[in-house]
Structure formats: structure tokens, C-alpha cells
Image (cartoon, helix red, strand yellow):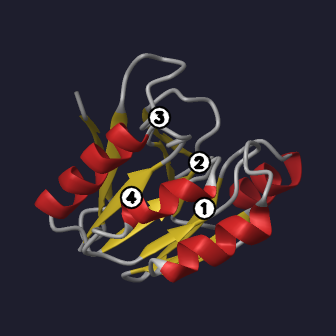
């Protein structure tokens, strides 16, 4: 199974639409969102997604109850600030990365993969045998680069993809 990884979509609905299109083209079986949707009106842009979406809040998600409700209406699940996800047998820690307690929990929790956002910088690396993926930013507001990432569960390998 291939898992799509996104973060920091913010309110850029045009790039959200591109990200959803790319995720559908790649036929992902699951999408993990590492936070910062910002506004509830962005939810309807995830509705065409052909895979379940699990996400967490970011530091720019002020109306959290509204976000959770509106995203649930389009079939997405926002699990708070931290989520543990079973992705085809891999234990995945999903977090935005702005809260120290979440970062400590992820890096100390014996996870196979950590998916985090917040920095807006796309990166893939390994730390103490744990695959750490920051899919970067869909919005393109900080780095100027609009990216998503993909995780191949069977190979335990990830790669980045530009949306431009």
C-alpha cells in the first residue's frame, strides 16, 4: 500500500486541489495530514479524495471543534494533536511538530515512521532506525515549494513529489 503524506495546506485551496488530484492519480490507500488546515472551508476540497484521510491539528488551527466536525462531514478524521496510526502493520506517529510533548512522544515511542510538518521544509531521513518524513508544505507560502510525500509500506521507503 502507498500512503499519501501532506502537511501545511493552510488556506491554499488551489494547491489542495492539486494535491488531491496527485494523491488520487497515485491511487494511495490512505492519506495522513500533519496539520495546519487553518480554516474549515478547506474541507470540501478534500472531498474528492479517493482514500481515507487521518489528520492532526497544527499550530494555526484555531477553531478545532469546527475543523473536526466539517472534516468529518467529508469523511476525514482529525484525531487531535497526536495520532498513532497503523498503516499496513507499520506504527506511524502523526504530529504537526510544534508541541514539545508530541515531539518527545513520537521520538520516544518506538514507532516505525514519524510523519511531521510545521517547518514547511520537505525532508526524508532516518533517525535511530526510524523513518522520519516531513512532506513539506502543500501551500507553498514559506518555502515557495509545494510538495506532498508518499510512503510505500511494504518497502518502508518514502519519496517527495512537487505539485508545481
Q: Is residue 17 above or below residue 10?
A: below
- Disc 1 target residue: 94
Please state the horizontal and vertical placement of residue 82, each as a whole percent of the image: 72, 65
- Disc 3 target residue: 137
Q: Earlier in the sequence, mark 4 or mark 3?
A: 4
Task: Tell me the quarter of the picture where residue 50 sits.
Answer: bottom left
Is disc 1 in contact with disc 2, using a CB cutoff of under 8 Å? yes
Which numbered disc, 2 or 4, marks the residue closer to the eye?
4
- How far separated are the C-alphas under marks 4 and 1? 21 Å
- Disc 2 target residue: 116
Kind of element beneath mark 2? loop
Q: Which mark is residue 45?
A: 4
- How far separated are the C-alphas under marks 3 and 1? 15 Å
Task: Tell me the quarter of the picture where residue 71 sits.
Answer: bottom right
- How far separated are the C-alphas under marks 1 and 2? 6 Å
Q: Which mark is residue 121?
A: none
Q: Residues within 10 Å of mark 3 (few under 14, many from 20)?
A: many
Amino acid at each position: 500500500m502507498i500512503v499519501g503524506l501532506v502537511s501545511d495546506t493552510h488556506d491554499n485551496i488551489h494547491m489542495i486541489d492539486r494535491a488531491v488530484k496527485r494523491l488520487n492519480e497515485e491511487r494511495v490507500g490512505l492519506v495522513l495530514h500533519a496539520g495546519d488546515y487553518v480554516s474549515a472551508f478547506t474541507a470540501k476540497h478534500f472531498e474528492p479524495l479517493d482514500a481515507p484521510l487521518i489528520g492532526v491539528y497544527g499550530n494555526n488551527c484555531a477553531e478545532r471543534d469546527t475543523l473536526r466536525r466539517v472534516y468529518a462531514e467529508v469523511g476525514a478524521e482529525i484525531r487531535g494533536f497526536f495520532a498513532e496510526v497503523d498503516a499496513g502493520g507499520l506504527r506511524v506517529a502523526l504530529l504537526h511538530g510544534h508541541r514539545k510533548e508530541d515531539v518527545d512522544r513520537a521520538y520516544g515511542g518506538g514507532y516505525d515512521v514519524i510523519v511531521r510538518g510545521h517547518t514547511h521544509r520537505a525532508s526524508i531521513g532516518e533517525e535511530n532506525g526510524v523513518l522520519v518524513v516531513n512532506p513539506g508544505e502543500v501551500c507553498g507560502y514559506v518555502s515557495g515549494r509545494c510538495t506532498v510525500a508518499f510512503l510505500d509500506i511494504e518497502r518502508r521507503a518514502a519519496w517527495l513529489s512537487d505539485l508545481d
